[in-house]
Image (cartoon, rainbow, N blue to C red):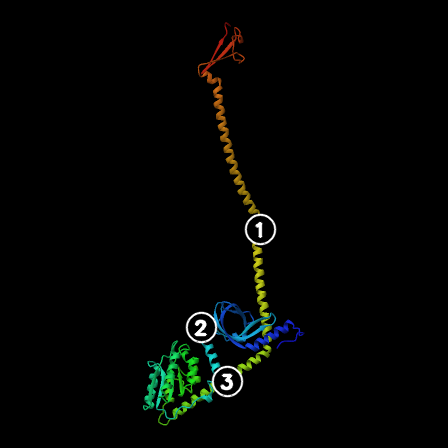
Amino acid sequence: MKSPKNDVYTVSRLNGEVRQLLEGQLGRIWLNAEISNFAAPGSGHWYLTLKDNFSQIRCAMFKGRNQAVTFRPANGQQVLVKGNISVYEPRGDYQLIIESMLPAGDGLLAQQYEALKMKLAAEGLFASDTKRPLPTNIQKIGVVTSPTGAAIRDILHVLARRDSSIEVIIYPTPVQGTDAAKSICDAINLANARNEVDVLLVTRGGGSLEDLWSFNDEGLAHTIYNSGIPVVSAVGHEVDMTISDYVADLRAPTPSAGAELLSKDADNKAQKLLSQLSRLKQAWQHYQLKKQNQVQTVEHRLQKQDPQRRLQMYEQSFDEMQLRLQQAMQTKLHAYTLMQQNLSNRLANQSPQHRLTLEAQRLSYLSAKLNDAMDDKLKMSEQRLAHRAQQLETVSPLATLSRGYSITLTGEGKVVQSPSDTCVGDTLTTRLRDGSVTSTVVEVG
């Protein structure tokens, strides 16, 4: 219904009405997805995101519900959950409130089984007033099962012991595998086309849910329901319940019990007792199924008005703030850690020891450089000295003396260059290569 144009909403009112709309329209759903962002704060509630390759949705599973989960969820795990779509009003986010959670591999078949059971029950396939009574005088029994399984051997053994006059016609079919359900349908249709037996016994031995899955087929349920011949379902053990058990005219807990129901003993008391017990169990199961649907409907209506939902919303808001606070504290702590590391690095760079080490390295470098410069300077001075010595040697009077020349000096040490530099009676010294000679001037010419 559209609201009047002058009806102005508040945000709180809008989110509240959207929540009621989603909860009222969609109700409880099943969802198969991958877990991410899983968080379990101290309140005991679980918060997570469920996603596939293209989308994601936020989810909450409160403590009262998650205590029944038999495993610890982990990021990346594929799960199958059942829950109700709602709106977290403080943030305006729509979310899934999870009621139950199973690992995807274990829960998918169970979820499909429950969904099909609800669908067929709503269509009236399980109604007790549609069940046909078994013939009072059974002469021929048609057995729809595997001709090589243990079930057919047990059935033949029971019938031979209780009433050997009953004729058994086997309609062979696989009872496990991808094509088994279609083969069972074909066998039932063949028996109806031949119309040669009084009753049909659809049966197989026990096994896991996967092993019995062929008897949880929707097509098989309609085939049994539309059969013109009364059908007894005896699938698995007593604790096993399949769709074929619900839709059949009578359910037997085991293949042997099915044979007991369809044969007479001396007083026929066992047959009547087993038949009545089976019908009682079947009626009780239909009653339980009906009440279960009513309980779920009332529970869904109650959830809309339940004050616990408001309390859970407040708890979720508290948990969200707590998680945000923890994240903020971790972010702040990381920032302070980086700052401390930065200051430590800066302090280390300004440390006197660090500077002394740098100056010592610089001094060592300059000392080595000075020694190298002094060595180079000394080598250059030695080279110049050697060159000068060579030049001096070239012009030295000693070099002249070594070639046979001599130098004459006066008593005052002056070199005699001319006879006029001397007088008679002067004492002269003549310097030779390897010594000197002293003489007196007796004549100046």
Residue tagged 1: 346
Q: Say which mark, if any, is on residue 290.
A: 3
Residue 192 point in image, percent of width and height? 38, 86
Q: Image quadrant of residue 3?
A: bottom right
Amino acid type of disc 3? Lys
Amino acid type of disc 1? Arg
Q: Residue furthest bottom?
A: 267
Q: Residue at x 52, y 37 (%)?
A: 369
Q: Nearer the viewer, residue 329 or 133?
A: 133
Q: Please say if 61 is above or below 365.
A: below
Residue tagged 2: 105
Q: Nearer the viewer, residue 191 or 267?
A: 191
Q: Nearer the viewer, residue 404 or 22?
A: 22
Q: Work out how far the residue at label 2 is from the one at label 1, CA to CA, in angstroms.
A: 57 Å
Q: Work out how far the residue at label 1 is from the one at label 3, CA to CA, in angstroms.
A: 76 Å
Q: Residue at x 57, y 60 (%)?
A: 333
Residue 284 point in image, percent of width and height? 47, 87
Local secondary structure at mark 1: helix
Residue 156 point in image, percent of width and height? 33, 86
Q: Work out how far the residue at label 3 is from the one at label 2, CA to CA, in angstroms.
A: 28 Å
Residue 29 point in image, percent of width and height? 52, 76
Q: Earlier in the sequence, mark 3 or mark 2?
A: 2
User: How many badges with numbers are in the image?
Assistant: 3
- Mark 3 is surrounded, within 10 Å at the Cα level, by few (under 14), some (14 to 19) or many (20 or more) other residues, namely some
Q: Which circle, 1 or 3, is nearer the viewer? A: 3
- In the image, is 6 to the left or to the right of 141? right
Q: Earlier in the sequence, mark 1 or mark 3?
A: 3
Amino acid type of disc 2? Gly
- Mark 2 is surrounded, within 10 Å at the Cα level, by few (under 14), some (14 to 19) or many (20 or more) other residues, namely few
- Mark 1 is surrounded, within 10 Å at the Cα level, by few (under 14), some (14 to 19) or many (20 or more) other residues, namely few
